[in-house]
Structures are given as C-alpha cells and as structure tokens.
Amino acid sequence: MDSLKPAIDLQKLPKHIAIIMDGNGRWAQEQGQDRLYGHFHGVESVRAIVEGCAELGVGYLTLYAFSTENWDRPEYEVTGLMELLVDTIRKEVDTLNKNNIKLHVIGDMQMLPDYAQQELKEALELTGKNTGLNLVMALSYSSRWELVNAVKNIAKDVKAGKIDPEQISQDTLQQYLTTSNFPDPELMIRTSGEYRISNFLLYQLAYAELYFTDVRWPDFRKEKLYEAILDFQKRERRFGKTSQQIKQEITAG
Ligand code: IPE
Ligand code: IPE
Ligand code: MG
C-alpha cells in the first residue's frame, strides 16, 4: 500500500494533536498475553507517533499515558507501568535530543514514585533547549484534578491581593492550567473503540476535532496517524459561525 503521507497538506497541519492511547490491555489479552505485554508494545507506537509528528512538523503532541484514575488499577499493573515509563524515558532521551524534541509533563507529579520523578526531572532538563516538536506527556493527569488545582491557586492569589476577581477572564484561567504554555489541541484522537474523554483536557478540547478509531494503541502506527490527520483536514471548523462565513473568510485570506 502506498503511504498516505504525501496526501497530507503540510500548510494545514493541526498545531496540536492530543491522543488518548487506549487498548493496550485488550490488545494483549486478545493474544492470550498479560496486560503488561500490551503496554510494552504500546511504547513502540509512542516512538512511531512521536517520530511521525516530528517528521511532519506538528508543533505539539500530548499523549495521555496515565490518568489519576489509573492509580486504582491492580498494584502489579501500576508498578509495571511506572517501571516501563522510567525505563523508556531513560532510553529515549538521546533520540529526543537528536530529533530536537522538547519533553514536557502535565499531571500530579507528586503522586509518582521518587525514582520516576527524578528520571523525569532529568529528562526535562536534558531536552529543555530543544526547539522542535513539543512532546507533552500527561502522567497522573486528570482534567478535574487540574481544574480544582487551578481554582485553588486562583483563590490563593485573590486572597493575596495578586488578582482582582472582577478581572478574571478566560486568559486568566488558561494561565493557571498545566497547559498554560501550549495552544489548545486541534485534533484529539482516541484509539481502541471507546467513545469517551476519560477526564482528559476537558477545558482545552472545547473546539478540538475528535477522531475515534477501533484500532488498539499497539497497532496505531504512522499510517494510522496520517489517516487521522487527513480526516481532520477534510473537516470544516466553524467555531460557532456559519459555513458561509467560514468560506468567505477563506476566500478573503
Ligand atoms: C491504555 O491501555 C494505557 C493506559 C491506560 C495506561 P489500557 O491499559 O487502558 O488498555 P485497555 O483499555 O484495558 O484495553
Ligand atoms: C484513559 O484510558 C487513560 C489513558 C489512556 C492513560 P482508560 O482505559 O483509563 O479509560 P477508561 O477507564 O476506559 O475510561
Ligand atoms: Mg483502557
């Protein structure tokens, strides 16, 4: 099969792609394997998709790797995932640097074991000067956690007299989110045939185009990414306006 890559209009790439990487466990179980086997293969998809986005010139890629709620999984799986995470980061830092990729993390880092926090901190420092793709890992992340945190910090700053409640705007709130340095995702992909958001970037996805595929995450490789981007490029993003207005705006340039 010919690659779909040449069909992509590079002038109309989503600036920010966010992905709920789902289906590792089922992928493994369908083959009579342990769930961790699925996570292990999921790492290969992470590599492929990060590389695919970097090659195309996508600005931001956010990957939902572990949710606040995932802490409630059996201890064996949580420990396995943490080890896989640390191991992967350690191995990938060189590749990230070679490809000019800057790593970021969003989520409740204090929940992570110390060794994982340490490894992440180093990786953030080592890739901090890169200027290419921004790779945002959502770890121990959930949107409700993030929003509660934002509200708490806004309240503290109001109390300290740093902000006037009357002046609070959407921009203010944006600055208190973990994603304050990133534009909102334009394309959100969820793999594995589930049609839900699972506490991911609830505020930031307000106008994202949503793309759902039955493909399990370990089978989601570059061609599947190209398919999602091509689908995105066919959509008309209206932001509340009419189709006619949007067409006029395009012809007016
Ligand atoms: C996604 O795969 C990875 C994480 C949530 C860490 P799952 O582990 O949720 O796999 P399924 O959904 O059970 O198949
Ligand atoms: C969402 O997947 C979280 C990640 C992919 C990290 P889950 O598998 O945890 O979501 P639910 O439980 O099916 O909604
Ligand atoms: Mg799942």
Image (cartoon, helix red, strand yellow):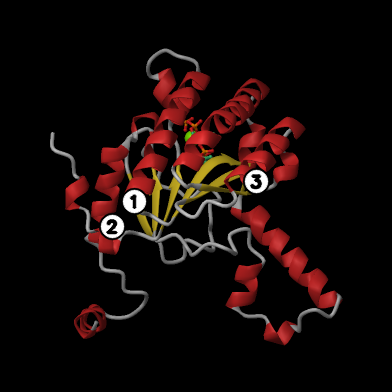
The percent coordinates of residue 108 (x first, y second) are 69, 47
* Residue farthest to the left, as pictured: 1
Residue 240 drawn at (x, y percent):
36, 77
Could you classify mark 2 by the number of other residues whose Cα lies within 10 Å: few (under 14), some (14-19), or many (20 or more)?
many
Residue for badge 3: 125
- Identify the mark at residue 78; answer none if there is no mark: none
Q: Is residue 138 above or below residue 159?
A: above
**Amino acid carrying mark 2 in the image:** Phe
Q: Is residue 195 left or right of residue 116?
A: left
Please name whichever residue, 84 or 98, is drawn nearer the observer in this view of the structure: 98
Question: Cα distance, mark 3 to mark 1?
Answer: 33 Å
Horizontal side of residue 99 vs 126, given as left or right: left
Q: Is residue 140 visible?
A: no
Callout 3: helix, strand or loop?
helix
For mark 2, give the secondary structure.
helix
Image location (x, y in percent) of residue 63: 49, 45
Left or right of 19? Residue 152 is: right
Which amino acid, by three-letter code, is at mark 1? Answer: Tyr
Q: From what the image shows, is residue 183 above or below residue 23?
A: below
Q: Mark 2 touching mark 1, by CB under 8 A?
A: yes
Indicate the quadrant containing the C terminus: top left, top right, bottom left or bottom right.
bottom left
Q: Earlier in the sequence, mark 2 or mark 1?
A: 1
Residue drawn at point x = 26 percent, y = 39 percent: 223
Q: Residues within 10 Å of mark 1 (few under 14, many from 20)?
A: some
Q: Is residue 71 above or below residue 29?
A: below
- Which mark is nearer the camera, 3 or 1? 3
For label 1, the residue is 211
* Total number of numbered discs in the rendering: 3
Numbered badge on residue 232: 2
Q: Residue at x 49, y 55 (%)?
A: 131
Residue at the image point whose x is 35% and y is 54% from the top: 57
